[in-house]
Image (cartoon, rainbow, N blue to C red):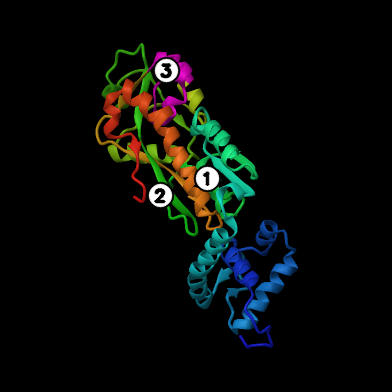
Amino acid sequence: MSRQSSPKDLSLKWLELFQICARKGSLQAVASETGLSVSTVSHHLRNLEDHLGVALFNHARRPMVLTPKGQAFLRNIDTALYAIRQAKAEASAGAVAEASYLRFGSIEDFESDITPELAVYLTEVMPNCDFWYHTASSHEIIEMLHNRKLDLGITTRPEELMRDLQDRPLLRDPFVVIAPAASSHSVADIVAGKTALPFLRFSKNLIIARQIDTQLRRLGVSAHRGFECGSNQTLMAMVAAGAGWTITTPLLFSCAKRFQPNLRMHRFPGKSFSRTLTIVTTPDCAQSVVDLVEEKTRALISEFVLAPLHNSSPWLKESFYLIEKGS
């Protein structure tokens, strides 16, 4: 690519649009995310290529594909843009009480106790802040963070890398078997499919469902499936009614208080496995705000979830706990 006359200084806007386009592979997708026109996005990317004197994209391919030089350039600017965003966030944050806007998302697992208490607390300590709160599945929250539609989210930690996002592990949440309280079958027989109780499972598009299915395959378990849905409360209601059994976690069991008298929670037979609940943030989210959210969330989990379940089911203490900070 021949070098044309170009502006003297490299534009931060060019770099940001290049990073988004490398992720999306489409000018239209970049335009939709940024609010710019397709022609404006294209103009900025051409300016960047002209300034560098190299082709960063193979413009003949759809979706757009990075050239080898484009891939090398992306690796280098990812770190630089992350540092710039973090510096801007810290410089503009000031005291927590002065924070003006926070877009916060959480999985519904915390809806019964944690999130309402956290929301009340944040409005008290950040009186000048406008909050926007959203409940969704883990993969939706992570996608919204990638697209900068949220600043902070509490989700299940995915197995894949989260690229430009940061995460702070909060809670180890082991998988357990939930069966009807009236059932006299052993948990081993239930999981092995030696009873008439069908397996009531989470919808396969959820991260938790994929984790459970992966473990069952490892164990060679092929449970008879009788029902599938995305709602933990519905699964708990079905099990309480004697319609089957399910695999879930103590955190989700704690959300189903009205059904608990008709449920029994058991250790998962054989090799145990767990999920990790984590706080995920964008580089733009001020660390002082993240520290505040983490500290309060940990305290609320201890009070409303861990203490009651450790008391009623002492065997959970060894596997259901807050993860040490910095781990």
* Residue 60 seen in this snapshot: no
Residue 174 tag number: none
Residue type at mark 3: give it: Gln
Residue at disc 2, secondary structure: loop
The residue positioned 48% from the left and 19% from the top of the image is 237
Discs 2, 1 touching: Cβ within 8 Å: no
Q: Is label 2 or label 3 in front?
A: 3
Pointer 3 or 1: first along the chain? 1
Answer whether residue 93 is visible to the viewer in this image. Answer: yes
Where disc 3 sits, the SS reads helix
Which disc, if any, is residue 260?
3
Residue stretch in magenta: 237-263
* 60 in relation to 222, above or below: below
In the displayed structure, would residue 198 be above or below residue 281?
Answer: above
Task: State the mark number for residue 159.
Answer: 2
- Residue beneath the point at 50% across and 66% down: 83
Q: How many neighbours does mark 3 have within 10 angstroms: few (below 14), some (14-19), or many (20 or more)?
A: some
Q: Which of 90 and 256 is in front in this view?
A: 90
Neighbourhood count class around disc 2 (C-alpha, 10 Å): few under 14, some 14–19, many 20 upward: few
The one nearer the camera, 102 or 318, is 102
Place of residue 249 in the rendered image (x, y in percent of width and height, measured from the top left): 39, 31
The residue under label 2 is which amino acid type? Glu
- Above or below, comparing residue 21 to residue 138 in the picture: below
Q: Residue furthest top?
A: 182
> What's under tag 1, amino acid-wise?
Gly
**From the viewer's perspective, is the residue at label 2 or at label 1 nearer?**
1
In what quadrant of the picture does the N terminus appear? bottom right
Report the residue marked by disc 1.
153
